[in-house]
Image (cartoon, helix red, strand yellow):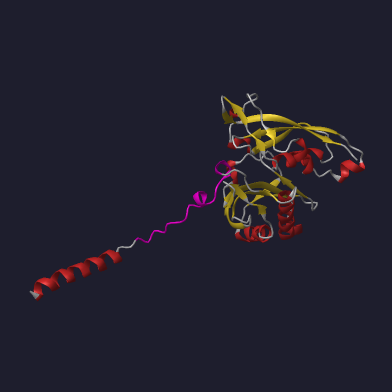
Amino acid sequence: MKTKIIMPIIAVSFLLAHCKSEKSSIEIVPNYDEIYFDAERVDIPAKEIKDNEVNEMIKKIGASLKERVGAKITKAAVYKFAIKLYLNEDGKIDKVRFDNPSKFDFTIDTSNSVIFKSDNDVRQKILSVLENYRFKPAVKSGVNVKFSKDLVFVVKLFTDGSVKEYFPDLAAQYNEKDYLFAAEQMPSPIGGIAEIAKKIVYPEAAKQAGIEGKVFVKAYVDEKGNVVKAEIIKGIGYGCDEAAINAVNNTKFTPGVKDGKPVKTQVAVPILFKIK
């Protein structure tokens, strides 16, 4: 009887040991794009806490790169970046992913320039800048959620020591033809034009030059009322155009409606600049 009992136990023990030895060496990495929501899956995407804060952040990255390259360059140095930011529920940057920037259309002149790659030293300098920034958290069903956000830009360092930042035409990421010119109910900023006006920072250069007038911005608004792109239809310059675009980009809209359903629409937004 004892022999009959002992033999199965030995067999099972051998089988378990054999299974453990066959554990795969392949690592399963987390799918952060499932953990961190994109703009299509939230009610309110993550936004800048202060106007033009992302632009200021990129300027600091440019200054950091200038410090690294210094007077070594004999031609303009061009750095292209496509960075995926992963934000936690407090709007702080948890993780980043450096993507291939070649999939974006950077319409800048790179003739007589050297294209620099983003090596580890460059990436560490960028991280040292990013860790000091925080965003307004994304919201879904009234609760703050994890969110992913693209940061795509070019820094060009010139031989005279000047630095210029460029942003790609992100229209390639979506089809503008999907955004209707007309709908039964067109999108409108929540809180009205006054809500956009609150976000306007009147450029000092425009104030000093006495520049006033209307800037017309075309806003591409998705089914959730998020502005996915804004561009100037008619501007007045002196930094007012950029201030208008930034304000529209940071405003939530009621979505356009057609056949009783929210739709993607494009709408013109007039913004008045008047010195008080």
Q: Where is residue 274 in the image (x, y as percent from the top left)?
A: 87, 37
Q: Where is residue 183 in the image (x, y as percent from the top left)?
A: 63, 24
Q: Position of residue 249 (x, y in %)?
A: 70, 40
Is the stretch drawn in magenta largely helix, strand or loop?
A: loop
Q: Position of residue 273 (x, y in %)?
A: 84, 37
From which residue to which does the magenta span run?
24-41
Residue drawn at 68 percent across, 38 percent down: 107
Considering depth in this image, is 12 or 139 the residue closer to the camera? 139
* Residue 29 within the magenta-colored segment of the rendering: yes
Q: Considering only vertical position in the picture, is 246 above or below 12? A: above
Residue drawn at 72 percent across, 58 percent down: 64
Q: In which quarter of the image is the N terminus?
A: bottom left
Q: In which quarter of the image is the C terminus?
A: top right
* Residue 44 within the magenta-colored segment of the rendering: no
Q: Can residue 75 be seen in this view?
A: no
Q: Considering only vertical position in the picture, is 3 above or below 121? A: below
Is residue 129 shown left or right of residue 31?
A: right
Is residue 88 shown left or right of residue 198?
A: left
Residue that extends furthest to the bottom in the rendered view of this protein: 2
Q: Can residue 120 be seen in this view?
A: yes
Residue drawn at 58 percent across, 29 percent down: 178
Number of on-image labels: 0
Considering depth in this image, is 110 or 216 the residue closer to the camera? 216
Is residue 122 shown left or right of residue 27?
A: right
Q: In which quarter of the image is residue 244?
A: top right
Q: Considering only vertical position in the picture, is 151 above or below 4? A: above
